[in-house]
Structure formats: C-alpha cells, structure tokens
Amino acid sequence: KVVDADDWVGPESLEQVMAVLRGEVDKDEPLDMLVTNYVYDKVGKRNKHVVNFRHAMEPGRRLTWDDLGHFGLTEYILMHALIYRTAVVRESKMQLPEHTFYVDFIYAYQPFPWVKSLQYVDTPFYHYFIGRDGQSVQTDVMIRRVDQLRLVNQCMVRATPERGTVPDGLYRYMIHFLAIESSVASVFMILSREPENYEKKKAMWADIEAYSPTIYKDVRKKAMSRALNLHGSLGRFVIRKGYFVAEHVVG
C-alpha cells in the first residue's frame, strides 16, 4: 500500500495492524495508541535500518506507560511508528505551527499525556525512504532550517509535563525524546559552522532552563545531551565527526 510517492507499508504488516485495530472497535475503552516498528530505507544502502521497540515494550498486550522498559539511543516513537485514537489527538488540542517542517516531532510527542493505554505490534509497518535529493531530512536542508528545528523544540518543551504530574514511565520517555530532538537541533546548528547558529544553540538550551529548571536538568543529564554540549571548537569538531560516523552507520 502506497503512503506517498516513495514511502510504503507492507501488506503483511498492514493485515497485522488492521486486525488489532478491528478488535478495538467495539470495546468500551479502546486503545489510545498502537506502536509498530519502522524501517529507514536509505537510497543506495543495501542493509536497511529497522527501528524496533522489543527491549522497551512487550508485544501483543495492552500496556501503560509504567510497563515500558528502557529505550535505546535510536529507539523513539516517531510519527511513522504510531497510530493514535482520534479522540486522543483532539483532547490534546494540538496545533502544529504553520509553514514549518519537522512538526512530526510535535505530533509524536504532545498527545502522549492523554494516552493511557498502548499496544506494541512487532512488525516493520512503515518504510521511510531517505537520501533523496532535496528531502527535508537531507543534512544540507536541515542546516538551512535550524530555526524551524528550534521552533519545534520550543513547542515540545512547552508540551512537556512537570515530573510528578504524569506517570513516571511517561515522564521518562518524554524526557528521552525531548533530549533526542534537542540534540538533533544542536547537531545541525553545529554542522552549519556559523557562529550565529552556535549562539542560537546556547539560547535554545537557555530557553529550556528558563521554562523549567527540572525539565532542563533531566534533559541535560542524558548522555547525548552532555555530548552535544561539549565546549569550544574542539567539542564542535568531535560532534561533527561523530555525526558523520552515525550517518554512515545508521543512515
């Protein structure tokens, strides 16, 4: 089944997902969110990178946030991996900024406090093709759009609940994901090699601290956040080299 001009879902995975969704139709309290695996299909790369959540979620049963385990560095629930119950999105009152790329980060983040039940289907449902010229996730394109990454970061920070106001498992996961997006934005500001963007990176982290010292502290203590805030030109050099290694390995 074609999702757009390039991305697609496999027919076998589609049947597995639809079987779960059909089973929820007549329930008094249907699932709030369904999670699947997804595949990074990079142009010219023989081995495809499959993102799965086997270490963090037990497949085939209804879960709560506190049932979740540890998410690895490259394991996060993007738009390609989730299906919301429509009411959850409406209740979250999510409004995506217009004329902005990368809002899929917000879509896969802001409604989470309204998700009370979820289920994981261990199947590579969505194949996401990357590496196409001019694509929004191309390195040079993302560098040009660092202001949009920063805007998305601001929206995500303001959608983050304070610790103790939501289940611990939910808070831990949202801090994990916020740290990832903050690191992504930081990387491309550093890759730009523009002093103006280095200052924007500092301002972005200062904005998080000003909004909530607790959220800032919890995000900054993540290993990826510490690595992305190495000081000086040597730190930026290490970050650039690390990015290109990761791009080669993961895509």
Image (tube, helix red, strand yellow):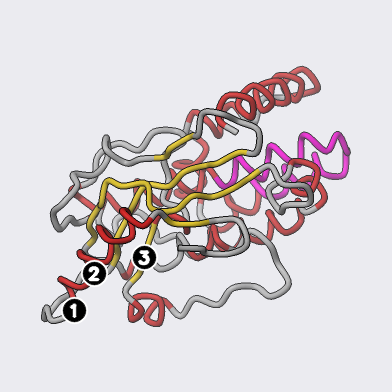
Residue 176, image x, y percentages: 43, 43
What residue does disc 1 label? 25
Q: Amino acid at mark 3?
A: Ile
Q: Main secondary structure of the magenta part?
A: helix
Cα–Cα gap, marks 2 and 3: 10 Å
What residue does disc 3 label? 83
Dot 3: few (<14), some (14–19), or many (≥20) neighbours within 10 Å?
A: some
Residue 230, image x, y percentages: 66, 25
Give left or right: position of 124 versus 18: right
Dot 1: few (<14), some (14–19), or many (≥20) neighbours within 10 Å?
A: few
Q: Amino acid at mark 1?
A: Val
User: Secondary structure under badge 2?
Assistant: helix
**Circles 2 and 3 in contact, beta carbons < 8 Å:** yes
Residue range of the region highlighted in magenta in the rendering: 181-205
Cα–Cα gap, marks 2 and 1: 7 Å
Which numbered disc flags the more N-terminal residue, 2 or 3? 2
Residue 249 to residue 58: above or below: above
What residue does disc 2 label? 21
